[in-house]
């Protein structure tokens, strides 16, 4: 089943002299259950592609089908709904609310989705358990390490059971030990069936995924299966 289908996607910022072609006729499909890394130099269009895939931004031209749905046909309100229900987002800088506990942070997406209060708590606790934070439910972000904060953010991203988990430099603010811990969680989530698309500039991180999509000048330059750890050994 195809989850992400970009057909001839272009994105132009500005106009006239200041026109920037951030994406230039990109074609890309991601199947259910894939684990992909997006790599490429700064300015190559990675963030723009993630913004389109994440329904945060609309392309200038081309078609985007998310889980079979033509995104261009959706209103802004419907897009917000899809972002909340079908997509989970993880960022470099965790973006947790500092005044809320881990549990409350993870409950938030369910508030917007209209999940009943009792169920919110149970599902948030379950998501936090899944990322190894069952004993940290009531801690605030400042009481957690960077890796633990990112795990809270991952729990928040999966709690509405998204079809795709989108991560933009999720290990960019973490040391190498913590990076491995966070990658282990992404690997486990993918093994359980969640499609994962992650932007990274770290080759060691990309190598843990199953497919590396390399952008340059707003286009897909290479798209190939990542070498497995086994192949490297
Ligand atoms: P990165 O290369 O780490 O993705 P960027 O600095 O390219 O970070 O972009 C960070 C954010 O700023 C992105 O959301 C991007 O869309 C936006 N951005 C990048 N370049 C410009 C620009 N020239 N004008 C306005 N916004 C920009
Ligand atoms: P990357 O994430 O690979 O660094 P981006 O998608 O952020 O690349 O940027 C691709 C190109 O589009 C860059 O030239 C960037 O400056 C430009 N760009 C990105 N966002 C904006 C924006 N909001 N306004 C103007 N230019 C932008």
Image (cartoon, rainbow, N blue to C red):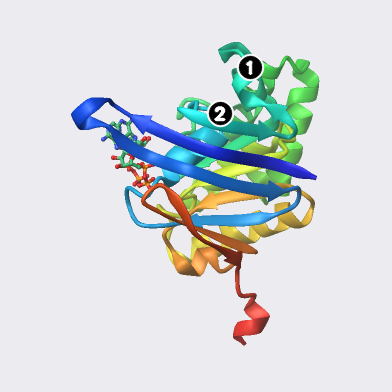
The residue that appears at 50% across and 40% down in the rendered structure is 50
Label 1 element class: loop
Would residue 123 appear left or right of 164 to someone viewing this image? right
Q: Residue 152: x and y, percent?
A: 58, 41
Quarter placement of the N terminus:
top right
Q: Quadrant of ligand 1?
A: top left
**Which percent across, then down, holds residue 29?**
65, 47
Dot 2: element: loop
Q: Is mark 1 within 8 Å of ligand 1?
A: no
**Mark 1 surroundings within 10 Å by alpha-carbon count, few (fewer than 14), some (14 through 19), many (20 or more):** few
The residue that label 1 is drawn on is 74
Q: Nearer the viewer, residue 185 or 33?
A: 33
Residue 154, placed above or below residue 100: below
Q: Is residue 159 shown left or right of residue 119?
A: left
Q: Nearer the viewer, residue 178 or 194?
A: 194
Q: Which residue is mark 2?
A: 55
Q: Residue at x 73, y 47 (%)?
A: 194
């Amino acid at each position: 089943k195809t989850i992400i289908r970009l057909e001839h996607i272009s994105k132009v910022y500005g106009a006239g002299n200041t026109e920037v072609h951030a994406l230039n006729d990109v074609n890309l499909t991601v199947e259910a259950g894939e684990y992909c890394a997006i790599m490429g130099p700064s300015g190559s269009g990675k963030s723009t592609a993630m913004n389109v895939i994440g329904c945060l931004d609309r392309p200038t031209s081309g078609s985007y089908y998310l889980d079979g749905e033509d995104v261009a046909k959706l209103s802004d309100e419907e897009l917000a709904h899809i972002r909340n229900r079908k997509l989970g987002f993880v960022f470099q800088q965790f973006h947790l609310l500092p005044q809320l506990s881990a549990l409350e942070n993870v409950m938030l997406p369910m508030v917007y989705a209209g999940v009943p209060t009792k169920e919110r708590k149970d599902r948030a606790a379950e998501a936090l358990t899944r990322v190894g934070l069952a004993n940290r439910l009531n801690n605030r972000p400042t009481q957690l390490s960077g890796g633990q904060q990112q795990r809270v953010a991952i729990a928040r991203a999966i709690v509405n059971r998204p079809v795709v988990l989108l991560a933009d430099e999720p290990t960019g603010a973490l040391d190498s030990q913590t990076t491995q811990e966070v990658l282990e969680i992404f690997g486990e989530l993918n093994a359980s069936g969640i499609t994962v698309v992650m932007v990274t500039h770290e080759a060691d991180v990309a190598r843990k995924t199953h497919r590396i999509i390399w952008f340059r000048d707003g286009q897909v330059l290479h798209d190939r299966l990542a070498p497995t750890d086994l192949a490297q050994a």
